[in-house]
Amino acid sequence: MKSDIHPNYRTVVFQDTSSDLAFLTKSTIATSETIEWEDGNTYPLAKVEISSESHPFYTGKQILVDTTGRVERFRKRYGQTAAAPAAAAAADAPPAAEASDAKEAEAKEADAGADGEPEA
């Protein structure tokens, strides 16, 4: 095995922020927070929004997860505003009349026989 190419595989505490479930397992995740576990040792802490304790598939009920602001953070990070994507999409799309005319022309070409005449 080559040295210094493998991630640090260590014991980490994962904590579900919506249900307060915490479990100790091994992982290579990089974290900046730590927590004192039930055994008295301090471990790196990785916070997750959904786990088996809060996921609707396992619980059988829908729980509202607080994800407010994700779209705004994305737009802020990548420099998009709410109007910019809509304007760009509108500029790229052909008007409805032109699009339907183009589809009709394509259909007529496809229906044309070997002699170039439309089939009856």
Image: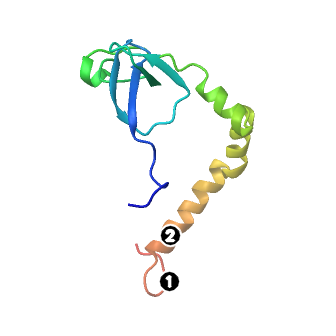
Secondary structure category for the residue under label 1:
loop
Quadrant of the rendering where the N terminus is positioned: bottom left
Task: Tell whether 10 sits left or right of 98.
Answer: left
Is 25 drawn above or below residue 101 in the view shown?
A: above
Q: Residue at x 34, y 34 (%)?
A: 26
Q: Which image quadrant for residue 8?
A: top left
Q: Which mark is residue 116?
A: 1
What residue lies at 32% left-to-right and 15% top-to-bottom? 39
The one nearer the camera, 6 or 29, is 6
Left or right: 42 in relation to 91: left
Query: What's the mark number on residue 11?
Result: none
Q: Amino acid at mark 2?
A: Lys
Q: Any mark on residue 108, and which? A: 2
Residue type (three-letter) at the residue carrying disc 1: Gly
Q: Position of residue 101 (x, y in %)?
A: 60, 59
Choose between 81 and 33: the one closer to the eye. Answer: 33
Most distant residue in the bottom direction: 115
Residue 46 makes an appearance in the image: no
Judge the density around disc 2: few (<14), some (14-19), many (≥20) Cα neighbours within 10 Å. Answer: few
Q: Viewer-proximal residue, 9 or 18?
A: 9
